[in-house]
Image (cartoon, rainbow, N blue to C red):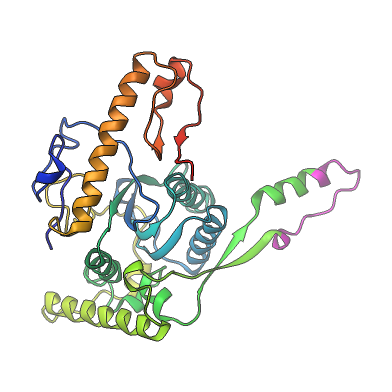
Amino acid sequence: MRTAALCPGTDPAETVPTSDSCGRGGIHHARYIEADVPYHVISRIFQGRCLLVPTDELNELIVGVVGRALELFPSVVLFALTVLSNHLHAMLRGQPDQVSACLGFVKREISRRYGPQIGWSGTMWDEYVATALPTVESQVNCLKYLLSQAVKEGLVESPLDWPGVHTAKALLDPKPLRGKWFNATGYGRAVRKQRLRRNPKPVDKERFVTEIEVRLAKLPAWAELADEEYRREVERLVDEVIGEARTARRGRRACGARCVRRTPRNTRRSLPKPPWWEERRRMICWADPKAKATREYVARYWAFQAAFRQASDACKAGLTTPAFPAGAFRPARYCEAAGNHAPMLSMSPS
């Protein structure tokens, strides 16, 4: 599948799928997220370690954290979620400030709540990469890619066999994903309150545990399909994934869920490159560069980058009210040095 690459200095009208120089001395690009465009998000565990080897307890924790994040950031819509032992994939959309905050919340809370259980201190994650999916074809292909996780690597025969959180199970199982959210703040307050009493009583943790359900939304590309039709389309993609993986294995058996659960957490594995990665570090879109929606999105992206660069230069020069584009994350260091204490995120009036 052809993709539209991010090439510093390239005119949007001339954008073609060629290698870029980002990460090799190229300029840094401001984060750009459109509220009505779905994005494929990938984030890996630090050093590619298998810290998220699936367990029932971890699955409940992840779903609980994701469910709580969706409650706190209501503009975020989740279309797919697959968590492997050393990285996660998601498809989502939402307001730019809430998308970033939601992903940060999920990664932070998993680190804080699960890290101590496995003897890991600090963050468990590297940064995330978000790639736009502006066309119908790109959204369907990305969904298939997420459904293929753990199958194309030969870990399991079917995505339904993956012992962790997986998009296939979430979409094909009539029951929603269920997890647990522990209100640590409320529990801590209750414990401190009891300590102030002359005869403190033990605080029951179960009082602060809430069951949370997570339901994946329909892809915008298939939003008009009835529930049963949507399920059949997902089943078709799953069948394709299983068939393609069997052909690639050439008669070899998949490792199986039991083998996956026995993986040592200190195992380091390099992530397989996504289909659009090639030699690039970052992408604007994972879509056909000739599609009208892709070209329009890329044009808006470059217009945003130019406006941000202009405002950033003005801010560094001492201007106290630089005109950052709507949805931009303001560079705190330069703005504060210039005496500008405006909100960090510049949103449109709507």
- Residue 251 seen in the figure: yes
The residue sitting at 43% across, 69% down in the picture is 217
Numbered label tally: 0
Q: Give residue 51's quadrant in the image.
A: bottom left
The residue sitting at 40% across, 52% down in the picture is 35
Q: Position of residue 143 (x, y in %)?
A: 29, 68
Query: In the drawing, does residue 33 fall left or right of residue 190?
Result: left
241 and 346: which is toward the camera: 346
Query: In the drawing, does residue 52 fall left or right of residue 306?
Result: right
Q: Is residue 329 above or below residue 159?
A: above
Residue extending furthest front?
349
Is residue 147 one of those drawn in magenta? no
Q: Position of residue 159 (x, y in %)?
A: 32, 75
149 and 252: which is toward the camera: 149
Q: Main secondary structure of the magenta part?
A: loop
Q: Is residue 169 above or below residue 184?
A: below
The residue sitting at 30% across, 81% down in the picture is 233
Q: Is residue 184 above or below residue 155?
A: above
Residue extending furthest right?
198
The residue sitting at 77% across, 55% down in the picture is 203
Q: Position of residue 167 (x, y in %)?
A: 37, 70
Stretch in magenta: 193-207
- Residue 272 seen in the figure: no
